[in-house]
Amino acid sequence: MVSMLVAGLAIGAGVGWLSASTRSKPPALPPPIAAMGDEVLIEYVTRLEDGSVVDDNRGSAPARFRLGDDRVLKGVERAVIGMRVGQSRQARVSPKLAFGERQPDKVVEVNRDRLRGLTDLQTGQRVRVESEDEQALTASILAVNDGSVTLDANHPLAGRQLVFDIRLLELTKQVHYRLRDRPD
């Protein structure tokens, strides 16, 4: 009896999408928006301010990551948040939100003997070296002298503002479930 009453109210009332006479569909929900915790798939082009391309993943494997997991640059994460699937966005990313500012203390002159096994050293070459605290790092050779080599352990794009053209290809929403206390 109750179920007939409820059904009768919905049909008889002729209200909105519940009306049997209009047989309309429920209103379409807007496409989801990327938020922290969501998994996204993007393609991108990274440029310097002068327009020169430094990275481009179009036509190759798109980048998949979860927003907030610190696996991509903060500036890219911030640009993706709020996007919808299929949307494109251009973002100017400051050094602070990209590869950081250049740090003068990461430029050091070392005795050439410390680079054993590395021969034919040339300016501009990237080399793997070990720091004084025995951590492996990559550095660029700035200068090669008779007995020393000047190394720069800053990221090559440190101190540079970058421009990203980003397109959101996929979005998987993070679902949060809350368990309620149930009486035994």
Image (spheres, rainbow, N blue to C red):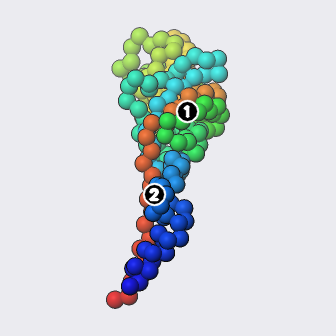
Q: Is residue 168 left or right of residue 93?
A: left
What kind of residue is marked 1?
A: Ser
In this view of the protein, can residue 132 be seen by the observer? Answer: no
Q: Secondary structure at mark 1?
A: strand
What kind of residue is marked 2?
A: Arg
Quarter of the rendering containing residue 76: top right
Q: Is residue 89 above or below residue 11?
A: above
| Residue nearest the observer in this picture, 163 or 168 | 168
Q: Is residue 7 above or below residue 151?
A: below
Q: Is residue 88 left or right of residue 159?
A: left
At a point 50% along the width and 60% down the height, the residue shown is: 17
Q: Which mark is residue 23?
A: 2
Nearer-N-terminus badge (2/1): 2
Residue at the extreme bottom: 184
Q: Which mark is residue 152?
A: none
**Label 2: how many Cα within 10 Å (few below 14, some 14–19, many 20+):** few
Count of number-bearing discs: 2
At a point 54% along the width and 19% down the height, the residue shown is: 53
Quadrant location of the N terminus in the rendered image: bottom left
Q: Which mark is residue 88?
A: 1
At a point 58% along the width and 45% down the height, the residue shown is: 82
Residue 139 point in image, percent of width and height: 49, 25
Residue 93 point in image, percent of width and height: 63, 33
Q: Secondary structure at mark 2?
A: loop
Q: Is residue 23 above or below residue 118?
A: below
Quadrant location of the C terminus in the rendered image: bottom left
